[in-house]
């Protein structure tokens, strides 16, 4: 599910947009009147969409854009004049007056884009630090010495144990080392 935060100077307008989104199958994480409240709500979230107007109580959209965490995208609701000024800023825009269909389709497209990025991040191989690599090497060395395995066999053994126990490879190496050293 995509995190959606609606930031408009009038809280009742923000709630109205949230209700439209909820009726169309989205889940709005928060409703705010200030950019500071939005930034606070984004804290701890990996990604999402911020739907905002040109001007909030405490800042304008460009200031909020600078404070967005890397995984967040912005949907600006503004007049056509403002939209013309902000083109090329990596901000999705919808002109006012707002049409429900345009809002729903745009949010849906943005949410799909975020989901694709999430899947891509999950599929990319995890990079281990030197300490983890050393731990894996030590566990393989112990298996190779004690059980007369090749390095490939020791690695396969660690992988199988990792899958069977539902732990990651480094945790499995730690378990093997603790069992073999006692």
Image (tube, grey):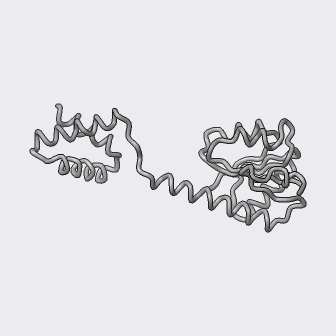
Left or right of 28 on screen, residue 182: left
37 and 79: which one is in front? Answer: 79
Task: Indicate left or right for 7 with 167 as reference.
Answer: right
State the residue at coordinates (38%, 40%).
Answer: 128
Quarter of the image containing the C terminus? top left
Task: Tell me where residue 118 sits by quadrant.
Answer: bottom right
Q: Residue furthest bottom?
A: 101
Tell me if residue 68 comes above or below residue 159 in the rendering.
above
In the rendered view, does 110 fall on the left or right side of 155? right
Residue 22 percent coordinates (x, y):
74, 60
x then y, percent, for residue 140 = 20, 41
Q: Position of residue 12 (x, y in %)?
A: 87, 50
- Callout count: 0
Q: Is residue 175 above or below residue 4?
A: above
- State the residue at coordinates (80%, 44%): 61
Name the residue located 22 percent from the left edge and 38 percent from the top edge: 139
Choose top left, top right, bottom left or bottom right for residue 56: top right
Q: Residue 138 at x, y = what percent?
A: 22, 35
């Amino acid at each position: 599910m995509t995190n959606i935060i609606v930031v408009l100077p009038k809280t009742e307008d923000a709630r109205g947009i949230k209700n439209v989104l909820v009726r169309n199958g989205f889940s709005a994480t928060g409703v705010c009147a200030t950019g500071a409240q939005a930034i606070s709500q984004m804290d701890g979230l990996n990604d999402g969409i911020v739907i905002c107007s040109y001007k909030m109580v405490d800042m304008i959209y460009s200031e909020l854009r600078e404070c967005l965490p890397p995984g967040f995208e912005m949907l600006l609701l503004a007049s056509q004049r403002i939209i013309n000024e902000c083109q090329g800023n990596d901000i999705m825009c919808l002109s006012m007056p707002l049409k429900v269909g345009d809002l729903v389709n745009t949010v849906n497209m943005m949410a799909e884009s975020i989901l694709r990025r999430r899947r891509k991040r999950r599929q990319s191989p995890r990079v281990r630090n030197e300490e983890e690599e050393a731990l894996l090497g030590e566990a393989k060395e112990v298996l190779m010495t004690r059980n007369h395995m090749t390095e490939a066999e020791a690695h396969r053994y660690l992988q199988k144990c990792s899958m069977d126990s539902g732990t990651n490879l480094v945790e499995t190496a730690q378990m093997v080392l603790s069992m073999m050293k006692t």
